[in-house]
Amino acid sequence: RFSSFVQMRGSIPSFWSQDISKMVPKPAIMIDRSDPYAEIPAKHFNNLMRRYGSPIMIVNLVKKREKKK
């Protein structure tokens, strides 16, 4: 028997932007919500399924809030 494990790491598969015209140390992230069916993430995960099969496990490492200073 054989088994394998593939680990991928990267950004959230979505469109986003930041307004850099203002002098702010950390400009707010603006997410484009014009895609009601989440087409970009769906394409990403469909591609993973074609390449590697199932199961696909996802770990959310996105910070919910800043550290207190």
Image (spheres, rainbow, N blue to C red):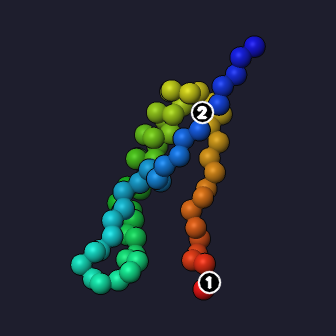
User: Would residue 56 be found to the left or right of residue 1 on screen?
Assistant: left
Q: Residues within 10 Å of mark 2 (few under 14, many from 20)?
A: few
Residue ID for mark 2: 6
Residue most toward the left? Answer: 21
- Nearer to us in this view, 67 or 46: 67
The picture places residue 25, in percent across and down from the top left corner, at 38, 81
Q: Do callouts 1 and 2 mark residues in contact (Cβ within 8 Å)?
A: no
Residue type pointed to by label 2 = Val
On screen, residue 67 above or below 3: below
User: Would residue 3 be found to the left or right of residue 14 on screen?
Assistant: right
Q: CA distance from mark 1 to mark 2?
A: 35 Å
Residue ID for mark 1: 68
| Occupied quadrant, residue 31 | bottom left
Q: State the residue at coordinates (60%, 86%).
A: 69
Residue most toward the top? Answer: 1
Residue type pointed to by label 1 = Lys
The picture places residue 16, in percent across and down from the top left corner, at 36, 62
| Occupied quadrant, residue 32 | bottom left
* Residue 24: image tag: none
Q: State the residue at coordinates (46%, 47%).
A: 41
Sequence-wise first label, 1 or 2? 2
On screen, residue 30 above or below 4: below
Residue most toward the right? Answer: 1
On screen, residue 31 above or below 12: below
Q: Secondary structure at mark 1?
A: loop
Q: State the residue at coordinates (60%, 58%).
A: 61
The picture places residue 14, in percent across and down from the top left corner, at 41, 54
Q: Secondary structure at mark 2?
A: loop
Q: How many circles with numbers are drawn on the protein?
A: 2
- Nearer to us in this view, 69 or 35: 69
The quarter of the rendered structure image containing the N terminus is: top right
